[in-house]
Amino acid sequence: MARSVHGQAAPRVMGAVVRECAGARGFGESREPGGGARSWAGLPSAGAANRPCAG
């Protein structure tokens, strides 16, 4: 099965946001038996709120 464009771009975008906002991110095993991976990101409210793109 071909991987979608969104699936390729999402990790890069998440990494850039986490770096810019001084956050943390990680990866874990899939909860489903079919494989894959889970990813998570945590952004400090001060770091995320002080960025130009923050609402």
Image: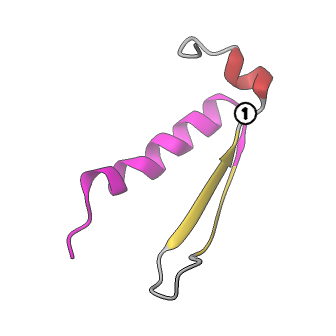
Q: Residue, x 67% and y 29% (percent of image)?
A: 21
Side (left or right) of 20 relative to 35: right
- Identified by mark 1, the residue type is Ala
Residue 35: % across, % down: 47, 83
For the N terminus, the quadrant is bottom left
Residue 6 part of the magenta-drawn span: yes
Side (left or right) of 3 relative to 55: left
Which type of secondary structure does the marked residue at label 1 adopt?
loop
Question: Residue furthest toward the front?
Answer: 32
Q: Residue, x 77% and y 26% (percent of image)?
A: 45
Identify the residue position indicated by label 1 in the image: 22
Side (left or right) of 8 relative to 33: left
Q: What stretch of residues is rendered in magenta?
A: 1-24
Residue 18: % across, % down: 63, 38
Q: Residue, x 64% and y 54% (percent of image)?
A: 40
Residue 23 part of the magenta-drawn span: yes
- Please tell me whether residue 53 is drawn above or below residue 9 in the rendered image: above
Q: Main secondary structure of the magenta part?
A: helix
Q: Residue, x 32% and y 50% (percent of image)?
A: 6
- Please tell me whether residue 39 is drawn above or below residue 10 in the rendered image: below
Q: Nearer the viewer, residue 31 or 43?
A: 31
Badge 1: residue crowd in 10 Å (few <14, some 14–19, many ≥20): some
Question: Residue furthest toward the left?
Answer: 2
Task: Tell me where residue 38 sits by quadrant.
Answer: bottom right
Task: Tell me where residue 28 sits by quadrant.
Answer: bottom right
Residue 7: % across, % down: 35, 56
Side (left or right) of 31 relative to 11: right
- Please tell me whether residue 50 is drawn above or below residue 44 in the rendered image: above
